[in-house]
Amino acid sequence: MMSLLALLSSEYATHLAILVGIYLILAQSLNLTFGLGQLFNLAHVASYAVGAYATALLSTEGGCSFFACVVASVVLAGVFSLTLGSIALRLTNDYFAIGTLAFGAVISALLANWRSLTHGVLGIPGIPRPNLLGVDFYDNRNFLALLLFFVVVVQGTFFLISRSPFGRALRALAEYDQAAAALGANTRRIRNISFLLSSSAAGLAGSFFAYYLNYIDPSSFSLSEMIFLLTIVIVGRPGSFFGVILSTALLVLLPEPLRFLNLDSATLGPMRQLLYASILFAIVWWKRKSIFPEQREV
Amino acid sequence: MLSISALEVAFQETTVLKGLSLSAAAGETVGIIGPNGSGKTTLFNCISGFAAQRSGTISLKDQEIQSLPPHERARKGLGRVFQNFGIFRQMTLLENMLLALESRPGEELSVSPWSSAARRRKEEAMERLREIHLEAKALNKASSLSGGQMRLLEIMRTVAAGAEVFLLDEPTAGVSPRMKDDVTEIIRRLQALKKTVLIIEHDITFIERFCGRIVVLNEGHVVLDDIPERVRADERLKEIYFGQGA
């Protein structure tokens, strides 16, 4: 019992809680477009990367404050989504997925190759933790408290959105686009707004990720990260607010026991990917009809 | 109320509607019949904005709407009831009804479910469901309804959205004979509310009950446009359905 308490109050537990917090923002925001809106958005990690790099660059090279960096990350990720949405939202179904995948690949290529800005694969080190009201945010417990505040705000916002007229309209057009339009729903505008909200929140998650690790490089924003996010939303049931919260905690913490198996890191990494891939495959196979319901047309 | 002039619609090389003209006055109920492929559903798709026309005009309340997207046509008072049921099956009946009420122009929308506008809409949605005897199922998913109940919900939802012109595409398709009377009743209610109704149907006996006019389409043209008795007696109707010499 004592050892369990010690574990829960340890630096390791704080680290895991921070990871869960960042992924809660990231997964719940993906749940808006992919879950409620049934938009197979494969560029969500790109928005996350835009937010992370905005904070990294502005804080290291621009010397900007915490709030300026967070706002810039949210706004730039939003602008990215509007650019992406103006093109990709003209596509439907599979073509939309391919279009967003292509956008994600462009961002990955830029992160790796635009060395003068992003430092390429070497990444950006030395991202300073926030400096607010004299609180030491290099202490992970303080950082967790700050993150928790944003996690609660974001979760609360997405909860209200999912139950608002906007959320209802988003679910309606996901099921039968033309019937929603025939009721007066501006389908393109609703999708664009959902994209903007989702991407902006991913930008916020990116900002916290950069602040937490103090270092970012392109490997954190790869396709496997996108697959991990999809797995979280699919396991939690697309569109389910509480389901995604539970699956985030479950899937972020699930590989942790593997650390105690004394495996070398070359084995541990692939084992995690294998674990997530197996879970994703099993759920998609088991729930294939409800996860991807047939879209109706006139 | 609704006026269509010289409407031409083509899909690649195939011309489906060939200069079709049609009008319906305020409060009028018009039946549209014709064999498969005559262009009935394409006509409705074009009026609603889901199919692009090559030429021609569509006017609603003396305003041309052919260049407007579907949602703007709906907000101007055009209601569409789909042949394959336009309800949202994964949503509850209450949510289906709320969607219609929330889409009305000028509705005050907020994220708060406790706002006075949200409470008022919920009460109105329950009242609308009561009118079609489905209030007890308000929190059930719409997928649990029978075909007839789905149709009632869809038509009442279109009423709630504030439509003045109703395009009903085979409202009795997928509806049991017993529920057909309920569908008839709700169409009669639309007539009592002085709504303009256009109904596509295969069953001429069914639409005769409430249509003052029947339009017969064939190969993208209006072949007949008259009162039901004269349409029924016209030889051209038999020719269209059974071929020449029938």
Image (cartoon, rainbow, N blue to C red):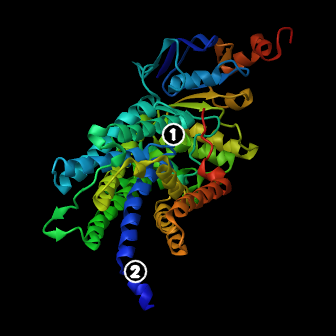
Quadrant that contains the C terminus of chain A: top right
Quarter of image, res A43: top left
| Mark 2 belongs to chain | A
Viewer-nearest residue: A157 or A185:
A157
At a point 46% along the width and 49% down the height, the residue shown is A168
Per the image, the residue denoted by label 1 is B158
Viewer-nearest residue: A298 or B85:
A298
Rate crowding at label 2 as few (under 14), some (14 to 19) or many (20 or more) other CA atoms within 10 Å. some
**Amino acid tagged 2:** Leu
Q: Is residue A263 above or below residue A90?
A: below
Q: CA distance from mark 2 to mark 1?
A: 55 Å
Left of B73 or right of it: where is A273? right
Per the image, the residue denoted by label 2 is A8
| Circle on res. A109 | none
Q: Secondary structure at mark 1?
A: helix
Q: Is residue B71 visible?
A: no
Percent position of residue A178, x then y: 53, 35
Percent position of residue B110, x then y: 33, 51
**Amino acid tagged 1:** Thr
Q: Secondary structure at mark 2?
A: helix
